[in-house]
Amino acid sequence: MSINIVNQRYHRLINVILALVLVLGITVSGVVYYKGDFIANRTIKLIEQEVPAYDLLRKLNNGLIEQERLLYEFYANQQPNSFERGFTQSNQQSQDALNILLVQFGDIFPLQLTRTSLQELDILADDFVQNINASETNWVLAHRQLVIIGDVRLSINPQIQQLSNLTENSVTKSKSDILSGIDLVCIFVLVYGLATLILAYMVAKVMKAYLSTAVNNQRLSLFSTRNPNPVISLDNKNIVTYYNPATENLLKKLALSTGKAELLLAKDIEVYQKQILDEGQADSKQFEYQIAQLYFQCNLHWLEDQRQWDMHLTDITKRKKIEQELQYKVSHHPQTGLLNHYELEKTVTRFCQTEHKFTLGLIEIRSFSQLIAGQGVTVASTVVKEVASSLDNILSNIDEAGCRIFHLGEKSFALICTSDLSNAKIDSLVEQIDLRISSTIFHCQYKVHLDFGFANYPEHGNDYTQLHKNSLAALDKSASSGDKRHVLFNLQLGEKLYYEQQLIEDMRFAIETTQFELYFQPQMALFSRKVIGAEVLIRWQRNGQWISPSEFIPLAERAGLIDSLGDWILYTACQKAQNLVSLGWNDLVIAVNISPLQFGHKDFLSKVTKVLKDTGLEAKNLELEVTEGVIIFNEEEAIETLAQLKKLGVHLAIDDFGTGYSSLSYLRKFDIDKLKIDQSFIQDIQHQTADQSIVRTIIELGRNLELKVIAEGVEGNEQQDILASMGCDEIQGFYFSHPLPEEQFIDFLQKSKSIEISGLNES
Ligand code: C2E
Ligand code: CA
Ligand code: CA
């Protein structure tokens, strides 16, 4: 919750309490004032009128009694002087009292009666005095007059009593009014006092809570002050209203003017602000942006109640750099730094979506394996780097606009030109590249020749897979056609591709239904002329036609079928070998070809172990033929696997020796038994002195390293003799025997045994 919301809440509460106190105070003051006034009036009335009324009534009554007494005294002593003085005085007293009462009570009925009675008394008294003062006083009349005067005076008593009652009622009412007024005032004052006390208690509580919140707020404000990350507040017009010391430090670090926190705002901050305000769902947003060399993550908050923005910045430069490095690694080839095959696929897919015409070209360094074989991996790698940088350079300066280069792997590159290139344009493009590449002297004076295969979108494919496949077909064609350096994909190539796809599909089915057979091509020791073993060669009849393993094995490798096919070959070959052993050919060594992909699998060693165990074949009866290709890029693992196989007792031969890597250093490191000279050196050995010298060198190399040497593809007597003269250990070839089905091979073995025996007998 924000500090200001808390503050506002407390202020509101305190204001409400104060308003309550005020309203209550005004009410109580009003009531007290009104009631006080009322009580005062009542009291004045009581003191000035009602209480004196008793006295006046008493005075009135006393005056009348005194008058009557004086009349009786005058009757008795006839002393006019003292009578008149006293009578006038008491008469005046009664008259005065009556007058005041008249003022107080008004001209009410009892007072009217009293006044009449007093007037009557005055007349009666005058008549009586005249009678007494007369010379002939009528004493009987005088007596009667006194009796009448007494009766009239007594007739006034009920009026005085009635007035007295009236006064008493008025006094009682005033008293109760005054008392209830005082009670009310007391209650109000009491309630006010209590309410004020409660409200004071509440204010105290609110104040206490406010103070503790204020402490927290202070702590919170310290949080932003001590926050090592920049915190900036903006008003709704994006004017900076606050920033913390970390912001100041950042400004210094970026060499920006101190105090100018607005320089740290993202350029597109308004876009995010608009999103927050428009969406209205969340009051914050997270985004990243860059200032100079630094990257920031910004948490932008909208504080609705304060109508201001809070920005929390975190420096994510390190993370960003790592991300960028990772991104770079994912999208670039580590060897050359060019965009890699993932990027090629992404780019092609993107271009296909935009439906603009473009050309995909694949480029490969021709005879790369020869380069590795001749110069070694390090030199080859340097050449690749140089070719990559040349290609990059050429394509960025070339006329053909929008050409981009990619490094797909080892010797392969790709280019995308954002226009659909015609054959003539491709000619000129390749010519320009060729001219520059052929005039460049690469590492170790190496001359580089490139092969190209092109496919156009959308003519030759609608997606990456199709375009890549078709340009690869064009490249294959270019690579296999000697002098032709580039090929644009065409219908025939499409047909070839289609044929291969069909072949792969059929092969898949053939693997499931075991349509393959294994043939055995005998191998002979030149010195003893004995059959020492055989090479297992796979055979497949597809729709009544033999398909060469040179055709379908590379396809099986490409289509990922080589694992299951290779497993079947190894198991079946061992099974058949064990059968031969059980027939008596105990020392026969059966050689099985192992594809580099098969060999490269982590579980290859355990597979061989298991197959030997399951078939019961002894390891000494099995030979594995691997090519130099298995060694090139995972040398350490290959050394380890070969050593483990050797430990198992399996024989190891390097197949097609002389065509690939052929480095002395690796031969020393590998625990192998045999070199198998490639048939290309044997084919023309009788005519080619170059081949003869290569073969001689290989045989000598074998001898030095204590390795057996076998020559394959021996077709004639002459070749056999040359090899024998050179000291070659073993031969394999049509001259000796074609590859044979199992039964024929058994016949062959039996025949050769009987020849051997008869030969022995002859000797
Ligand atoms: P490779 O391992 O070099 O096998 C020798 C090839 O030379 C075989 O061809 C064989 O029939 C042929 N050959 C034998 N003697 C002569 C000869 O005197 N003259 C001529 N011109 N050729 C001869 P194939 O059977 O067509 O096999 C071709 C390639 O297919 C093999 O070359 C090998 O790389 C691969 N391959 C064959 N069988 C298998 C297999 O079971 N597994 C694997 N992974 N590859 C195999
Ligand atoms: Ca072989
Ligand atoms: Ca071979």
Image (tube, helix red, strand yellow):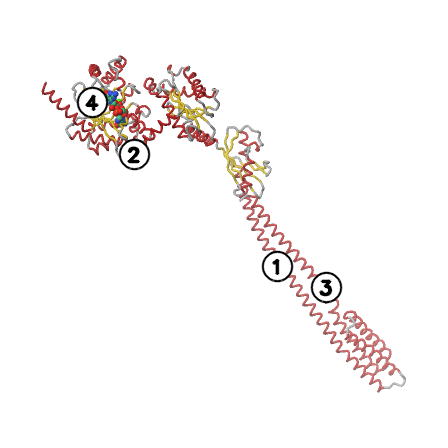
Query: Residue 79 falls in which quadrant of the image?
Result: bottom right
Q: CA distance from mark 4 to mark 1?
A: 129 Å
**Tag nearer the camera, 4 or 1:** 4
**Tag nearer the camera, 3 or 2:** 2
Looking at the rendered structure, the kind of residue marked 3 is Asn
Query: Residue 633 falls in which quadrant of the image?
Result: top left
Tag 4, which secondary structure?
loop
Does 50 sit left or right of 311 as displayed?
right
Per the rendering, the mark at residue 191 is 1
Looking at the rendered structure, the kind of residue marked 2 is Phe
> Which one is earlier in the sequence, the residue at label 4 or at label 2?
2
Tag 2, which secondary structure?
helix
Q: Residues within 10 Å of mark 4 (few under 14, many from 20)?
A: some
Reading the image, the residue beneath label 2 is 509
Reading the image, the residue beneath label 3 is 41
How many numbered circles are shown? 4
Point out residue 15 in the picture as x, y percentages from the top left corner: 61, 50
- Residue drawn at 18 percent across, 20 percent down: 525
Tag 3, which secondary structure?
helix
> Which one is earlier in the sequence, the residue at label 4 or at label 1?
1
Residue 642 visible in the current orientation: no
Most foreground residue, 398 or 156: 398
Most foreground residue, 746 or 639: 746
Q: Is residue 159 above or below residue 202?
A: below
Q: CA distance from mark 1 to mark 3?
A: 25 Å
